[in-house]
Amino acid sequence: MAEQKSDTELLALFREPATKEKAFTEIVKKYQERLYWHIRRMLVDHEDSNDVMQNVFIRVWNALSGFREDAQLYTWLYRIATNECLTFIEQQKKKASVSLNELESGLSNKIKADKDFDANKLEWKLQLAIQQLPEKQRVVFMLRYYDEMPYDEMSKVLDTSAGALKASYHHAAKKIEDFILNH
Amino acid sequence: MSERVLLTQMETSKEILTELQEIAPNLGITGISRAPYALPVGFFEEFPENLMNRIRMEAASYSEFNAGQQNAEVSPLLEIEEISPLLAGLKNKNTYQVPVGYFESLKTKIPALESKPFAPKTKQAPVFTLKFIKYAVAACLIALLGTAVFNLTYHKTTDPIKDLATVSDQDMANYLDSDDIHWTPGITASSASIDFSDNDVHDLLSTVSDDELEQYSASLPEEKRNVN
């Protein structure tokens, strides 16, 4: 297996018209799984996640030439993906004219409708518990718990101080634990 | 992935797990779980190519749109020539005619256009409009007609007694004299019958014979024969 190129190398190749597409395909391959799961955990449904991920990478394609390398590429990608997810959720709310609570219960119903859903399994209870969290806490918990993102990087993704993110993660983890113990 | 990056990631994972076990021991007891969601087989293998196809397609439609935008800047004449040469040929043929010299004489027909510089007209509210005058005249006519009709209807018969008050005694005496009517000043219509005594009646009928009176009485209706 060939050695994966660094972000700096890929960005340099992207700036060359001859290697632009190839470099971009490499970037997609490098980050697609991490971004997909981040999006999927937010939106639950695969088709929605696929649509949003395509939109994320199209945005990246259009804006990558202006990307400044003083930030990490993956932080920037997560920022775009998170914003796209929140925009998608917002659009869904407007389309269906439902409140956030109704939308969250809708996401819980989607989880329960999954063919592999098993209410006795901890990982499924965990997914249901995550959907009970407020939007911001949900993102913080997922970025820390699943993506293992350091607080200073998360701070760049969410434009929030590391201290506030720590507090948010703490509250989220406690709520999830309580939900799992009581359900 | 380099060994250093892998080591850093492992350290971060360990830190996050320790942090979680401190916050929520029951949650961190089994370690960090993975999302249980399934996804279509080969999704990640196909995704980059599917994405690039969409990007190429959108870029192509964007180029077409841009080309369309450039075409939109073509002059109207060239545009209509391309769409319909027939219409392009008819473009400057005007079917309407104007009187000879109309446009030349236009300025002299409207002197204000030449002498005064253009100034925006301020609209003034007219005090009397033609419409207002028409209504006013109609209202006056109706009022006059109404008054005339009212007077003719309700003031046609005047009270003769009231009118007599305005006539002097001398005029009244002259009038009565001229008609050979005996009248004594001071006797009014209301007092005349009161002062008319039996003697006066006797004097008045002194020249009438008894036969004539009997004939007159016989001609009266039954109920009036015994009065007085």
Image: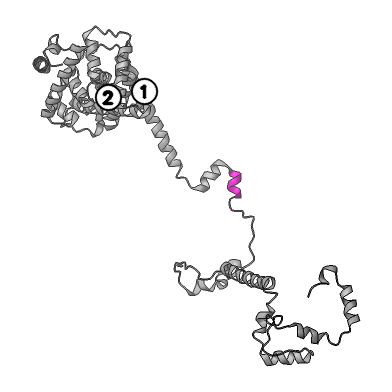
Q: Identify residue type, mark 1.
A: Asn
- The answer, for residue A20, to whether it is visible in the render is no
Q: Which residue is mark 2?
A: A24
Q: In the drawing, what numbered circle is on residue B53?
A: 1
Does the magenta portion include B92?
A: yes
Q: CA distance from mark 2 to mark 1?
A: 13 Å
Residue B194 percent location from the top left of the image: 69, 80
Task: Check the image and report above or below for A18 versus B226.
Answer: above
Q: In the drawing, what numbered circle is on residue B95?
A: none
Residue A108 percent location from the top left of the image: 29, 17
Residue range of the region highlighted in magenta in the rendering: B85-94
Task: Check the image and report above or below for A76 versus B10.
Answer: below
Task: Check the image and report above or below for A108 versus B163.
Answer: above
Residue A135 percent location from the top left of the image: 23, 25
The chain that hosts pointer 1 is B
Quarter holding residue B193: bottom right
Residue B38 percent location from the top left of the image: 29, 11
Is disc 1 placed on a helix, strand or loop?
A: helix
The chain that hosts pointer 2 is A
Taking the image as shown, residue A101 lies to the left or right of residue B101, namely left
> What quarter of the picture does the N terminus of chain A occupy?
top left
